[in-house]
Image (spheres, helix red, strand yellow):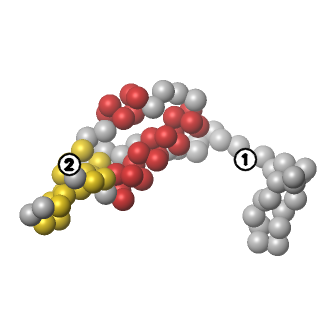
Amino acid sequence: MKLSNQAIGALMMALQKSLMEQSDIVPVLQEMNFQAEELDSSHSRLMVTNPPVVSLDGVELVEDPSVPETDSGVLIPEE
């Protein structure tokens, strides 16, 4: 059995949530419900039926004037 792309995304969201909130990831993982999706007689993958929600409410993005902006809008730090 393998993780589905959806389950991998759910795990990544759990990691992002714990990093943003500076909290332990374990409770988020413990709350996840998994379901097997049968692809064929010998292959299945796990899905997460309740992926975590990451909210940006209250988060303020601040531009750093010391980091130059490229023409593409991508910020590239100076070395």
Question: Is 49 rendered above or below residue 68?
Answer: above
For residue 43, which quarter of the picture? bottom left
The residue tagged 1 is 61
Mark 2 or 1: in front is: 2
Is residue 53 visible to the viewer in this orientation of the structure?
Answer: no
Q: Amino acid at mark 1?
A: Leu
Residue at 29% from the left image edge and 48% from the top image edge: 48
For residue 71, which quarter of the picture? bottom right
Q: Position of residue 61 (x, y in %)?
A: 72, 47
Which element type, helix, strand or loop, lies under badge 2? strand
Going by the picture, which residue comes out furthest to the right? 66
Residue at 31% from the left image edge and 39% from the top image edge: 32
Going by the picture, which residue comes out furthest to the bottom? 71
Front position in the image: 62 or 19:
19
Real-space Cα distance between discs 2 and 1? 36 Å
Residue 59 is left or right of residue 27, and the answer is right
Q: Amino acid at mark 2?
A: Gln
Q: Determine crowd level at label 1: few under 14, some 14-19, many 20+ residues with C-alpha closer than 10 A.
A: few
Question: Is 53 rendered above or below residue 22?
Answer: below
Which element type, helix, strand or loop, lies under badge 1? loop
The residue tagged 2 is 35
Going by the picture, which residue comes out furthest to the front? 42
